[in-house]
Amino acid sequence: SHDLQFGESFVRFPYERTFTLTNLSDLQARWEVLANPPASKTIATVEVRPEAGLLEPREAVEVRVVFATQRLGRVELPLKVRIVGTTNPGVTLKLVAQSVGPRVEVSTPALDFGKIPVLQDRSLPLVVTNRSSIDAHLTTAE
């Protein structure tokens, strides 16, 4: 099996990689990417273009893979390419990513309100910046 690395990936954000499929034989080869079971969509979604094709002898094709993790942590999902009409097991790529959530930064690690007289309000600015390619959902507690 070969790994197709997606590195650190924001959860539910699509990343694209390519791999090259080469026909090393002297015969035409029809190939297809096999679909993963529907349950795998809870781990990651995968789109492949093209999904199938015919390779002439010694010809190569570049295959585009769009991969989006659906849960946090290390994610591995097989991508199987079958050679049609042979007993050859084909090729299995392992799609690998470290799925992470949003990254936010705050302008200060602590807010010092000092002494506040009873029944008076005081406000201080706090800037929260999303450093991610995905939305960061924030809430405040009273």
Image (tube, helix red, strand yellow):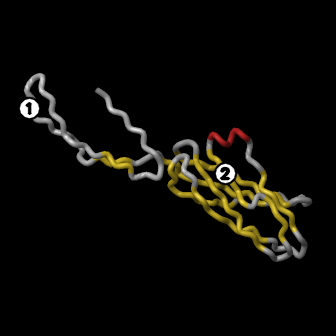
- The quadrant in which residue 22 appears is bottom right
Structural crowding at the residue carrying mark 1, measured as other residues with C-alpha within 10 Å and reported as few (<14), some (14–19) or many (≥20) = few
Camera-nearest residue between 4 and 70 = 70
The type of residue carrying mark 2 is Val
Q: Is residue 92 above or below residue 109?
A: below
Mark 2, residue position:
46
- The quadrant in which residue 66 appears is bottom right
Mark 1, residue position:
115
Camera-nearest residue between 43 and 86 = 43
Q: Residue at x 59, y 50 (%)?
A: 68
Q: Position of residue 96 (x, y in %)?
A: 60, 54
The answer to whether residue 137 is left or right of residue 14 is left
Q: Is residue 2 above or below residue 59?
A: above
Q: Position of residue 71 (x, y in %)?
A: 55, 42
Which residue is situated farthest in the top direction here?
119
Structural crowding at the residue carrying mark 2, measured as other residues with C-alpha within 10 Å and reported as few (<14), some (14–19) or many (≥20) = some
Q: Residue at x 7, y 26 (%)?
A: 117
The type of residue carrying mark 1 is Lys
